[in-house]
Image: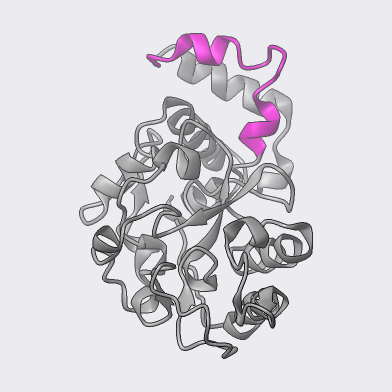
């Protein structure tokens, strides 16, 4: 997992939301009308917003490290869930979040001040990150479960680790890893195991071919409890394209060898 530095593109991120707020101001009602997540999802806001998030995340899912593009396979993840009560909102104590956002029900929609002191959390730049669209892990799997904003921990790359068997573990964030499924999803574990084995025998991820992958799969299938997944690896649809989206782990393991 990698640290996400929101300070680098902060002004750009806030500007997109400022534009949304400005467009939603209604002079007749003297209030912001439909300044909400549904509006943020409109193409004119979502397109540049997702581009910005992907750039600051090195085009990687905030959780599982899958390579992402600005398409339907990339989702906007609310760190503080999209639908959360004011009471539960108070559980989130990250300074980066609390200093920049406010519960949407407490946002003063009749005060035309842009930029506001704090942004409604459902559209706030600091509360949104890019995630993959898997239903077995990450954003969709997590749902509304409480998690720490672990990717805002500058030492996260040392606190979340992956062993040679593909397991994800952390002394501090193990509960969070389980809630987002990256420590329990068996296919992710297998993918990471494959990348570890490839990192042992290849100098560069760019040199890897299908024969290399096949040899690794054959080798670990003999010792794996997930033989059916590996046996069907090349079936239609092949898992190869999905595996290659996790190339980040090649360098991770290479640096550990």
Q: Position of residue 177 (x, y in %)?
A: 33, 45
182 left or right of 21 in image:
left
Q: Position of residue 254 (x, y in %)?
A: 51, 51
Residue located 38% across and 33% down the image: 165
Asked whether the viewer can see residue 24, the reply is yes
Q: Nearer the viewer, residue 53 or 170?
A: 53
Direction right: furthest residue: 44
Q: Nearer the viewer, residue 91 or 70?
A: 91
Direction left: furthest residue: 171
Residue located 32% across and 42% down the image: 179
21 left or right of 77 in image:
right
Identify the colour scheme used: one colour
Q: Which residues are magenta?
A: 224-244
Total numbered badges shown on the rendered structure: 0
Residue located 56% across and 24% down the image: 216
Classify residue 166 by image quadrant.
Answer: top left
The quadrant in which the N terminus is found is bottom left
Q: Position of residue 196 (x, y in %)?
A: 48, 39
Q: Position of residue 71 (x, y in %)?
A: 74, 47
In this rendering, the answer to whether 213 lies above or below 99 is above
- On whether residue 177 falls in the magenta region, the answer is no
In this rendering, the answer to whether 250 lies above or below 49 is above
Residue located 61% across and 85% down the image: 11
Asked whether the viewer can see residue 59, the reply is no
- On whether residue 229 falls in the magenta region, the answer is yes
In this rendering, the answer to whether 116 lies above or below 168 is below
């Amino acid at each position: 997992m990698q640290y996400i530095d929101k300070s680098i593109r902060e002004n750009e991120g806030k500007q997109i939301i400022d534009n949304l707020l400005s467009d939603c101001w209604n002079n007749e009602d003297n209030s912001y009308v439909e300044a909400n997540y549904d509006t943020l999802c409109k193409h004119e806001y979502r397109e540049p917003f997702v581009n910005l998030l992907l750039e600051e995340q090195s085009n990687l899912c905030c959780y599982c490290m899958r390579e992402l593009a600005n398409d339907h396979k990339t989702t906007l993840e609310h760190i503080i869930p999209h639908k959360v009560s004011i009471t539960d909102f108070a559980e989130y104590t990250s300074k980066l979040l609390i200093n920049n956002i406010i519960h949407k029900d407490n946002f003063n929609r009749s005060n035309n001040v842009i930029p506001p002191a704090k942004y409604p959390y459902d559209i706030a730049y600091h509360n949104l990150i890019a995630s993959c669209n898997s239903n077995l892990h990450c954003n969709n799997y997590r749902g509304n479960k409480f998690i720490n904003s672990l990717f805002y921990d500058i030492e996260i790359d040392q606190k979340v680790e992956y062993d040679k068997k593909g397991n994800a573990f952390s002394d501090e964030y193990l509960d969070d890893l389980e809630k987002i499924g990256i420590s329990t999803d068996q296919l992710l574990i297998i993918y990471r195991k494959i990348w570890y084995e490839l990192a042992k025998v290849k100098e560069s991820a760019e040199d890897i071919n299908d024969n290399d992958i096949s040899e690794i799969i054959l080798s670990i299938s003999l010792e794996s409890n997930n033989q059916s997944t590996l046996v069907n690896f090349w079936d239609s649809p092949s898992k190869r394209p999905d595996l290659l989206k996790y190339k980040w782990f090649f360098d991770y393991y290479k640096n550990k060898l």
